[in-house]
Image (tube, rainbow, N blue to C red):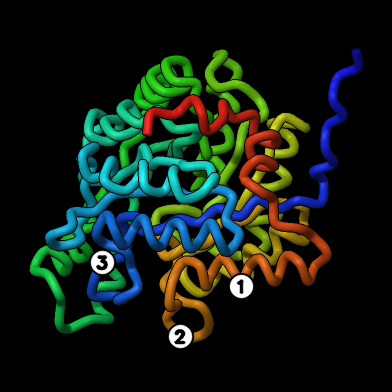
Amino acid sequence: MSEPKKRNLSNKVIITCAVTGSIHTPTMSDALPITPDQIAVSAIEAAQAGAAILHLHARDPSDGRPTPDPKVFMEFLPRIGEACDAVVNITTGGSVKMTVDERLAAPIQASPEMCSLNMGTMNFALYPMATRYKDWKYDWEENYLVQSDDNIFRNTFRDIERIYKTLGEGHGTKFEHECYDVGHLYNLAHCLDRGLFKPPVFLQLIFGILGGIGPDVDNLMFMKKTADKLFGDQYRWSVLAAGRHQMPFATQASMMGGHVRVGLEDSLFIGRGKLADSNAQQVAKIRHIIEELGYEAATPDDAREMLGLKGRAAVKF
């Protein structure tokens, strides 16, 4: 009996939606999901609009600050899993204020198909955003931003190995390897040389975070060329760019054969000076662009096949 024929996925673009994150604060947009109910609704709507992967953080429902509490995650993860078939991708970044133990707590409990994984230690600064606002919804927000000039996001090689062994070997979880600079690609190549991670790896090339590589198209070209040199045909890649660079970079990545990430974690806007109404609105916009370019939005099962994921039945929510 012959093996089933594999589908042609060369024309499919994976859309990831990063639903809430830990960068933006509640004052910045009323559309930013805060409570478990808001996160669930926003994520489900994004999946219905065409997102194959949902990248998820949690927030304290009382004031919107980032939280690693697995109990909060479990208030929205089962609801999302029941309502749609999207791949759930849980952060192992959380926020720069969290320890590795805290950042691992929810993924260990949920055992997701995917987790994000920052590929190095870096400055991670948000403080320029604080100058745009005078009145704040919650008293934690201003200091959270202003004091970020002293932030270091920690992910040493030891941390990366621990996260891989805990989730990759322990749970069969694959990773969205977040690469904020060229050195992060070399960090990943070093880890692969050591036998960590299983190809094909999924790169998320990130532009425009203060502390990482800048949002210039030349930098995108160089990051892609470096990835080709380091990983050959053993990788898939996606692009996200912060703020106003979100849609132009996603469009460029689509034209280059890459995948894309949008969402209110990365940008609060839908156009120049216009706040987005929802995550779904951003997903719908990039899906329209992808389709106008002659591509198709990948389904969750397309993404599972392309990235070698363990499948929805193997998670614990």
Using the numbered discs, state the Cα–Cα distance from disc 3 to disc 2 in whole angstroms. Answer: 17 Å
Residue most extreme to the left: 139
Q: Residues within 10 Å of mark 3 (few under 14, many from 20)?
A: many
Is residue 200 left or right of 179 when viewed as pictured? right
Which tag, 3 or 1, sits closer to the chain's start? 3
Residue 231, percent from left and from top? 70, 31
Using the numbered discs, state the Cα–Cα distance from disc 3 to disc 1 in whole angstroms. Answer: 23 Å
Q: Nearer the viewer, residue 191 or 163?
A: 163
Query: Residue flagged by tag 3: what amino acid is it?
Result: Thr
Callout 1: helix, strand or loop?
Answer: helix
Q: Which residue is mark 3?
A: 25
Q: Nearer the viewer, residue 136 or 106?
A: 106
Q: Nearer the viewer, residue 219 or 309?
A: 309
Residue at image coords 43%, 39%: 118
Is residue 141 left or right of 242 when viewed as pictured? left
Q: Nearer the viewer, mark 1 or mark 2?
A: 1
Residue at image coords 29%, 75%: 28
The number of callouts visible is: 3
- The answer to whether any part of residue 207 appears in the image is no
Query: Residue flagged by tag 2: what amino acid is it?
Result: Lys
Residue at image coords 64%, 29%: 308
Query: Residue flagged by tag 1: what amino acid is it?
Result: Lys
